[in-house]
Amino acid sequence: MLNLDWHFFPVFDRLDPAAAYPGTYNLGLVVTSVAIAILAAFVALSISGRIAAAATWRARYAWATAGAISMGGGIWSMHFIGMLAFSLPCGITYDALGTVLSMIPGMLASGIALAAISKPQAPGLSRLSVSAVLMGGGIAAMHYSGMAA
C-alpha cells in the first residue's frame, strides 16, 4: 500500500500537546474516494434528465429521490472514505449514529437542487445559482456534522 506522508509541523522529542501529529494518506482510498464522487455525480446528473421527462408527479418524485440518494450518498461516501484514508498515530473514533445522520443534509440539498434544475424548461442563471448555493450548503452541513461525529 502506498502512503503519502504529510508532516504538518516538526515533531519534537518531548511531548508537546500543541504540536500537530504527523499524518499519512492511503493513496488507494483517496483514489477510491474521488472515483466514487465522479460516479455519483454522473449517475445523479443522468437521473436529472429522467426527472424532467417524468409524466406524473409521482414519477418525478421517485426520480428526484433516486437522484438525491445517489448524489447525497456519493458526497457522504466520498467524505468518509477520504476520512478513512487519513491516518494519525493516535486513535480516531466515530459515533455511528452521528455518522449516519450526517448523510441527511447532503441528500436533502441534492434532492431539492436536482428537482429545481430538472424542470422541463431550461433552468435560468438564478435557478442554477440558487441550486449551486444550496448544494454547497448541504455539503458544508454534511461535512461539519460528520466531523462532529
Image (cartoon, helix red, strand yellow):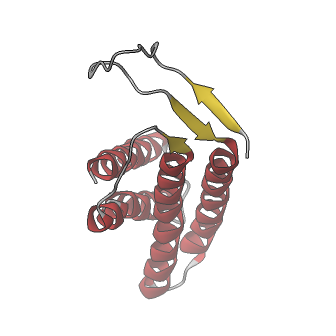
Query: In x, y percent, where is residue 142?
Result: 35, 52
Q: Residue at x 46, y 38 (%)?
A: 88
Rendered view: 4 above or below 136: above
Q: Residue at x 56, y 70 (%)?
A: 52
Can residue 118 be seen at all in this image of the molecule? no
Q: Nearer the viewer, residue 135 or 72?
A: 72
Query: In x, y percent, where is residue 64?
Result: 47, 72
Q: Nearer the viewer, residue 139 or 67?
A: 139
Rendered view: 137 above or below 112: above
| Quadrant (top left/top right/bottom left/bottom right) for the C terminus | bottom left
Query: In x, y percent, where is residue 124?
Result: 49, 45
**Is residue 39 rendered to the left or right of residue 123?**
right
Identify the image quadrant of residue 115.
Answer: bottom left
Rendered view: 139 above or below 68: above
Can residue 145 be seen at all in this image of the molecule? yes
Q: Residue at x 48, y 19 (%)?
A: 8
**Residue lying furthest front in this view?**
13
Q: Nearer the viewer, residue 50 or 56?
A: 50
Query: In x, y percent, where is residue 80?
Result: 47, 54
Q: Nearer the viewer, residue 39 or 123?
A: 39
Identify the image quadrant of residue 17.
Answer: top left
Identify the image quadrant of residue 101.
Answer: bottom left
